[in-house]
Image: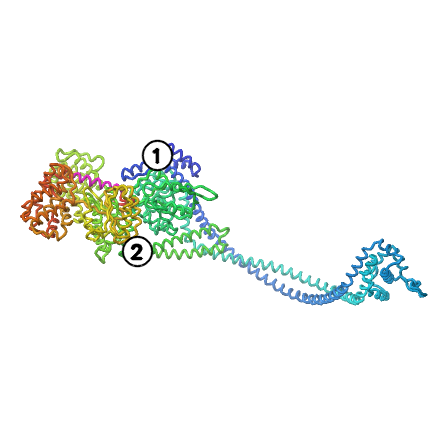
Amino acid sequence: IDWFSEWPSDALKSVASQFLKDVEMEKEGTRDACIDMCMVFHQSVRRLADKFFANQGRFYYVTPTSYLELIGTYKTLLADKRKSVSTLNKRYESGLAQIFEAEDQVSVMKVELIELQPVLAKTVIETDEILVVVDKETKDANKVREVVAKDEEYAAGRAAEAKAIKDECEGELAVAIPMLEAAMAALNTLTKGDVTEVKAMKNPPGGVKLVMEAVCILKGIKCEMIKDPAGGLKKVQDYWGPSQKLLSDSNFLPSLHSYDKDNMDPAIVEKIKPYVAMPEFEPDVIKKASKAAYGLCCWVRAMEAYDRVAKVVAPKKAKLAEAEAEYTELMVGLNEKRAKLKEVEDKLAALNAKLEEMMTKKAKLEFDVDMCEKKLVRAEKLIGGLGGEKERWKQVAADLATDYTNLTGDVLLCSGYIAYLGAFTLPYREEVLKEWVALCEEKKIPCTNAFKLSAVLGEPVKIRDWTIDGLPNDSFSIDNAIVMSKSRRWPLIIDPQGQGNKWIRNMEKKNSLCVVKLTDGDFIRKLENCIQFGTPVLLENVGEELDPTIEPLLLKSIFKQGGAMCLRLGDSTIEYHDKFRFYITTKLRNPHYLPETAVKVTLLNFMITLDGLSDQLLGVVVAKERPDLEEAKNNLVVQSAQNKKKLKEIEDKILEVLSSSEGNILEDESAITIISDAKIVSNDIAKAQEEADATEKEIDLARMGYKPSGEYTAVLFFTISDLAEIEPMYQYSLTWFVNLFVASIAAAEASENVSTRLEHIKDHFTYSLYCNICRSLFEKDKLLFAFLLCSRIMGAQGRIDATEWLFLLTGGLGSGVDVAKPDREWVTSKCWNELTRLSKLDAFKGIAEHVASKHQMWKVVYDHDSPHTQTFPDPWTSLDEFQKLLVMRCIRPDKVVPAVYEFVSCNMDVRYVTPPPFNLSACYDDSAATIPLIFVLSAGSDPMAGLLQFAEEKDMSMRINYISLGQGQGPKAAAMIKEGLSAGNWVVLQNCHLAPSWMQALDRICEEFNAETANPDFRLWMTAYPSPIFPVTILQNSVKMTNEPPKGIRANMTRSLQMEPIGNASFFDGCSKPKHFKAMLFGLCFFHANVQERRKFGPLGWNIPYGFDDGDLRISVQQLRMFIDENDELPLAALRYATGECNYGGRVTDDKDRILLNALLEKCYCSEIAESSHYRLTESGLYHTPCEAPTMEQLTGYIRGLPILPMPEAFGMHANADITKDQADTGIMCNSLLLMTQSGGGGGGGGAEA
């Protein structure tokens, strides 16, 4: 894309169509109309930019990027606004629905309550009856329950006794049982083979035989009587034979398992006991003899042990059986009683179930009645609390519905405003907006009739916060703030008065704003940190070009890396915090940003408006005159802002609760409580706010008494701010202006009457401002400023018509009335054309015809030497002083400047046409270590001699350092300033205009001046010719001075008498021949003024213009004193040669000019002037020596009586000699005034144009 070429209409429409095809529209025709409007916006702003440049000299480029920004902004804003308006509308509608529903429910609930109460009463009676029955049955059941409980307790006791016996038996048996089980286990290990093995033994071991004997005894097998193996006749018992028989029995082992251990013969047991007691009968001993015998041994021992225990347990078992039998009998009777108890309890349960049912019914009825009553109370709270809001909410909801429809057009207009109009001043914005709104209505795009950006995108609470933070309280500034907050690009604020900078600093202070400049050494590092941590940055005092390093930031070239949003700045990739904000401001009054810069930012013209400044200055004067009022006002503004913010938050909370409540709101007690509490707080705040509003009205009424002062003073500021249009060095800061105003408030004459007091302040400040500004103006602009000051004041008072003002400056535009030109030589074509155009103005209708018919009467005025003082022919005698200037412009344009002198003198004071003489001491007093002093140079002026003399007076002659700037001198000057700051020296930077590349560095040095660290004796002096590259910041914050020869003989001579060495009393009165010296000194001052003033006549004055300066006068005066003191006779020849040929003549290169110079000098350096007390310096005698040996007071008093504007005869010329000069002066004045009028008086214009 060629960013510098204009896109044709088809391309604009095609792009808009492509981007807007997805945007939801009510009708397709509306979409087409919006596409057309986008194209119209772009083309109309292009035309507006051309007009802006033609009238204001301000550049603004309309690029395709602006068009894309328009469309992108429209889509984003439309979606956001539709969502927010729709959400808000739903909330209000939901809130209304809940209120309406509550109102509808009230009558229904009242009927329900009436119906429920008798039902509840009947249910209560029935429930009480059942309660009596249940109570009786419960008592009966309790009696049965007590009997059963006693029986159960007795049965439980018997059961416990039986269990104790059983446990005891089992405990004792527990000793024998393990042995028995172990024996059984041992038996289980025996096999038939083991038995056979024992049986087969022919001569078994004693242990085996012993075991088998015990087994036979237990089994009841009798022994055999055999012969004693030991010998003898005695027979002994032998069990081995029976044992073998027993072992042969196949049922041997099972018989052991089934042995009736519980019924053993006590005789057998007695027989066994000795065996068990034998040591050799121990199982371990037996086990060594035979495995089979071991098992049998264990079995025998277990049988004996079991029997031993069983005999102890047997009685107890009998007792257990008896106890169990008794328990069984008890349980039979108990179960019968339990059955009877169950029957009673079942009956009671049925009664209780019925009672529960009735209680539930009763509880439900009571709940319903209670809920009904509570709902009625809640409904009363809801309706009572929000009923007053119902009508307002209905209106708001209706308005929001309308707003939603109008968003299509309103947001389109807002987008056009944001994308294109930020750089324009208020009149231009209003002009194009009026055209856009009319086109929207014509194309039937829904939009608000009286469109205002703040009404569509503004949030009252936020705007109030902005104004508290220092945003000027006028529509222009508020619109700028809205554009800044809604634009997708970072703002670049054109802020010559520093209002935007101050507001941003206050607004972002709580967010730790970082203020940087492009000239800071660590600028990029600070910026990187702020981007990462989301800290806002203010980049201030930029020029017409921005550092290429920050281009990615301006373009918002953000990308995702490692899951985080990142930005590449220089060589570094840093994380981008979404809370980061970036502001750029410039102090340049009319910067020229090329398209490559303008497309990356949102340009905002933040120049202060008349309304905004009037409000601020009203605050200043009230703060000084009535600090109590201003403090109360400021407190109320903050309180009102907080109240309105809280009210908005409470309303949002109420709407949120209403809209988020599910089901019936009256059933949600917490929601009703929240709403009620919130409404109580809201009512309290609203009441407090009403009181605050009433108090604020009273305060405003009292403050309004001071309003004229604020309005008047604001007009003065715009007057001086427009001076920069004619000379770049005429820059004045608002801070300086306000400080001067405050000083005047303190110095003005006091009065109890407010109007009188304000009049004193007005008079004092106006003249104070005039004096302070005049010292920084060139001579050619001092009358211009006085006239501008007077006309702006009168225009603000409605005493000058804007069309008449424009006619004075331009002579009218277009064709005039059709009247035949009179055939008179003095009525030139130019004069007649202007008269015919003048006749079109209301106050001058018929003047052309009158001049044509009464030309003799007008010829008298025309021919007069001072036509501006003459009375015009009837009926034009009623014209006021300003209107006479218009007539004078037509018939005698050469006398407009003298007429302006008269006009200013008549309407203000003669003080305003006699600029105060230059006073270096007063300028020094207004400076400080941090406030530089600047000599603005003109051809031939050299302030160094006067400055060095002043340094001597201040005892600084040994502490003054000076350097003439040029290539390579910057670092030396910086070092000199650094040394001066600490040592308290004076530093003089000469010819600053010759070091344009070092001016930025100088600007940074001056910005870093710190009153706390700088030596109070330090002063920075600068000299420079007017230059557009001179830093605006320095100009605005410095004391500016011009040191030109004053305009006019009177002013020039006055200044000459005040300068060194003439102004020194010892020099003036110390001559040995005071009569001769003072007479010739007066003549020399007249000569000096004459040769300087002749330059304004052009070739009639000098063939070549010469830069005669104060140095020529100074050396000539010193020579005059020396020659007179050292000679008895007047050395006229020597004086004429030294002065005419050397001092002044040294500059003269033209031979005719040299003759003229010497002729003029001879008139002043002659014996007659030395001897006469009334020597005529001009033919008429208007200029003459005042008296013999006059004092300084007599000289200055005489000079003050001379005319402000010298007549040509003062220069020895014909009366008509100044016609050409005066006509040129008129043209220069009108052109300069026209240039300032087109500037529109700052951001808002206001009425400053008048």
**Tag 2's secondary structure?**
helix
Residue at label 2? 630
58 relative to 650, above or below? above
Q: Is residue 549 magenta?
A: no
Quadrant in the picture for residue 1100: top left
Q: Residues within 10 Å of mark 2 (few under 14, many from 20)?
A: many
Name of the residue lying farthest toward the right: 233
On the rendered image, what quadrant is the C terminus found in?
top left
Q: Residue 4: which disc?
A: 1
Along the horizontal axis of the image, is 407 left or right of 1156?
right
Q: Identify residue type, mark 1.
A: Phe
**Tag 1's secondary structure?**
loop
Q: CA distance from mark 1 to mark 2?
A: 52 Å
Q: Is residue 1227 magenta?
A: yes
Give, as a single range, the part of the protein colored magenta: 1222-1239
Along the horizontal axis of the image, is 1184 left or right of 183?
left
Q: Position of residue 193 (x, y in %)?
A: 85, 53
Q: Position of residue 605 (x, y in %)?
A: 32, 43
